[in-house]
Image (cartoon, grey):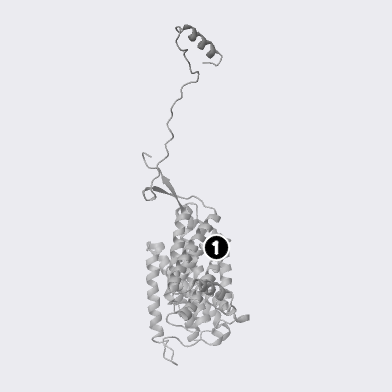
């Protein structure tokens, strides 16, 4: 009813009303309609929520780097908590792990000295992993390379001027041949390479013990190690006390980077790593590329053994390889199988080893604690791979 008609109807009703009756009052406003308040969705407790896992098609490298950094920081935080619980003051952690390790000249030289074989073993793991070949026999290939280099030294193969290159070549070939068996078993008979490469580590280590406790035992002191290498069989030192081993490792890293990122073989390896079946369908020689990557991985591990015995130990010892295989896997995981990143990560891991020795001396922390820190970081990094490749989406519950 419009506002203009309201006074007229009021007057008409007043005239129709009997005399003495109170005039009727009409409310012209429409009656109010009662409406219900919107219901808020009921919140479910976190433990009762359901999520679905979806595979990510692509994630920007910035987000991958962020997730990886968070995982590393989480591993470092857990490791710091363990060390603090072991009796190290929080203020001493920063001093030991950063200041004394990387800003002290003598300690930094020790880090680079330790980093040379770690760069090589990290490159060996990275190249094999790019071909989806899980080479866990890095330590066995190191042992074979060191034994081959020691053979050249003990039996004085070649003139003195070429003795060191011959030791390098022997180590390269020995590591390559030790990786050939698991590669052929994988490609021909589909034998799991994790088992074959891991078991060959025990074969190589027992053969090493047979040599150093037997025919190659040092006749001078009778301890289980070979005779000391001569001066021309040792990797020489560069200026400022740096070993030439770090220069050799960096040159190998550059060659590996060219092989992986620039060469045609590296392009093929990307196809093999992404989808071997699809790579085979488009004409990529999957078997040849896998074989080449595994052989190169074994050769680099053999060279790492040569670097340890010729650059660090100066002779063949019974436990020179201990811990390098695990470190190589850690370096490959952290570097995402990138050769240049593996070099940087290897230097950081070497700093962890040098700091671990310092903790042993000044804080009576066992070296197994350093290995525990490595294991924690590996677990955190491996867990981060799940969030890089997958996403979680909440699933709405029925009736809510």
Could you tell me residue 59's position as x and y percent?
Answer: 52, 52
Q: Quadrant of the C terminus?
A: top left
Quick one: 61 or 245, which is closer to the camera? 61
Which residue is most to the bottom?
220
Query: Badge 1: few (under 14), some or many (20 or more) residues near its Cα, within 10 Å?
Result: many
- Please name the residue shown 48% across and 21% down the image: 30
Could you tell me residue 393's position as x and y percent?
Answer: 44, 47
Could you tell me residue 33's position as x and y percent?
Answer: 45, 25
**Where is 189 relative to 237, above or below?**
above
Which residue is most to the right?
239
Quick one: 205 or 351, which is closer to the camera? 351
The residue where tag 1 is placed is 260
Quick one: 149 or 236, which is closer to the camera? 236
Q: Secondary structure at mark 1?
A: helix
Could you tell me residue 72's position as x and y percent?
Answer: 49, 63
Q: Is residue 74 visible?
A: yes
Quick one: 207 or 333, which is closer to the camera? 333
Q: Is residue 178 visible?
A: no
**Where is 299 relative to 158, above or below?**
above
**Where is 45 relative to 368, above or below?**
above
**Where is 391 relative to 133, above or below?**
above
Number of marks in picture: 1
């Amino acid at each position: 009813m419009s506002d203009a008609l309201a006074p007229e109807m009021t007057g008409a009703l007043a005239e129709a009303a009997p005399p003495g009756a109170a005039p009727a009052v009409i409310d012209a406003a429409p009656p109010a309609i009662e409406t219900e308040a919107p219901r808020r969705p009921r919140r479910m407790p976190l433990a009762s929520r359901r999520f679905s896992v979806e595979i990510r098609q692509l994630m920007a490298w910035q987000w991958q780097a962020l997730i990886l950094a968070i995982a590393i920081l989480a591993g470092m935080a857990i490791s710091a908590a363990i060390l603090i619980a072991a009796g190290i003051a929080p203020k001493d952690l920063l001093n030991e792990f950063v200041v004394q390790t990387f800003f002290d000249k003598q300690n930094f030289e020790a880090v680079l000295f330790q980093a040379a074989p770690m760069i090589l073993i990290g490159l060996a793991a990275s190249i094999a992993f790019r071909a989806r070949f899980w080479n866990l026999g890095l330590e066995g290939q190191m042992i074979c390379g060191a034994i081959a280099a020691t053979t050249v030294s003990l039996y004085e193969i070649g003139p003195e001027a070429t003795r060191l290159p011959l030791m390098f070549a022997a180590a390269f070939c020995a590591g390559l041949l030790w990786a050939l068996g698991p590669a052929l078993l994988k490609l021909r008979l589909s034998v799991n390479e994790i088992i074959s490469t891991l078991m060959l580590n025990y074969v190589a280590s027992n053969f090493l013990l047979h040599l150093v406790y037997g025919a190659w035992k040092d006749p001078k002191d009778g301890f289980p190690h070979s005779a000391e290498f001569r001066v021309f069989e040792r990797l020489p030192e560069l200026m400022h006390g740096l070993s030439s081993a770090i220069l050799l490792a960096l040159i190998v890293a550059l060659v590996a980077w060219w092989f992986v990122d620039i060469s045609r073989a590296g392009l093929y390896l990307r196809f093999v790593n992404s989808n071997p079946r699809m790579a085979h369908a488009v004409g990529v020689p999957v078997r040849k590329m896998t074989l080449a990557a595994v052989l190169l991985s074994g050769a680099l591990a053999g060279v790492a053994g040569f670097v340890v015995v010729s650059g660090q130990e100066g002779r063949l010892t019974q436990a020179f390889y201990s811990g390098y295989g695990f470190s190589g896997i850690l370096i490959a995981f952290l570097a995402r199988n990138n050769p240049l990143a593996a070099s940087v990560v290897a230097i950081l891991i070497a700093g962890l080893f040098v700091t671990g020795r310092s903790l042993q001396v000044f804080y009576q922390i066992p070296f197994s604690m350093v290995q525990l820190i490595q294991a924690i970081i590996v677990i955190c990094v491996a867990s981060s791979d799940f969030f890089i490749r997958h996403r979680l989406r909440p699933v709405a519950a029925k009736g809510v």
